[in-house]
Image (cartoon, rainbow, N blue to C red):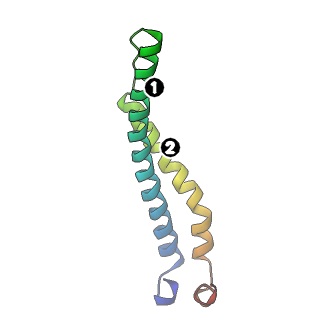
Amino acid sequence: MKAIGATNRNVLHLFLIEGATISFLGGIVGIVFGFIGSAIICSFVSEYVGTSFSAVITPGTIVLSLFVALIVGVAFSYYPAKRAATLNPVVAISSQ
């Protein structure tokens, strides 16, 4: 990107947006698996204990989990993004 005129800021933003998008989608997949897993666990516990057992999943916990996934994704993509933004374009193109 820098070879075609992108600034360090452009490269940094691209990497951070990519990290945020991937972590947000991962958070959504995690929420879906959490719903499915909690339903399965509640079913088994209710069957073996003999008492009605249900998980409580609120919109607040869903928003919190998406927020945490987003923050983790941005935090762990910042260093590679900063490194890529400051990389010399000639070195980036020639390295394999």
Please tell me which residue lies in front, 11 or 45: 45
Determine the residue positioned at 46% across, 39% down.
65
- Mark seen at residue 23: none
- Whether residue 55 is visible to the viewer of this picture, yes or no, is no
Q: Amino acid at mark 2?
A: Val
Quadrant of the rendered structure where residue 41 is? Answer: top left
Q: Mark 1 vs mark 2: which is more N-terminal? A: 1
Query: Element at badge 1?
Result: helix
Q: Does the image show residue 79?
A: yes
Q: Residue at x 39, y 19 (%)?
A: 54
The image shows residue 24 at horizontal and vertical percentages of: 42, 51
User: Label 2: which residue?
Assistant: 68
**Disc 2 packing (10 Å; few <14; some 14–19; many ≥20):** some
Please give left or right for residue 54 compared with residue 7 in the image.
Answer: left
Pinpoint residue 85: horizontal percent, then vertical percent. Answer: 57, 75
Task: Please say if 24 is above or below 39.
Answer: below
Q: Quadrant of the C terminus?
A: bottom right
The residue nearer to you, when weighing 58 against 36, is 36
Q: Quadrant of residue 66?
A: top left
Q: Nearer the viewer, residue 23 or 52?
A: 52
Q: Residue at x 62, y 80 (%)?
A: 87
Q: Which mark is residue 41?
A: 1
Q: Is residue 28 left or right of residue 74?
A: left
- Expressed as whole percent of the image width and height from the top left, the position of residue 57 reads 39, 27
Question: Circles 1 and 2: CB distance less than 8 Å?
Answer: no
Q: Indicate the quadrant where residue 53 lies.
A: top left
Which of discs 1 and 2 lies nearer the camera? The answer is 1
Image coordinates for residue 7, horizontal then vertical, percent: 50, 80
Q: Is residue 72 above or below residue 61?
A: below
Q: Could you tell me the amino acid type at mark 1?
A: Ile
Q: How many marks?
A: 2
User: Between residues 89 and 32, which one lies in front from this camera angle?
Assistant: 32
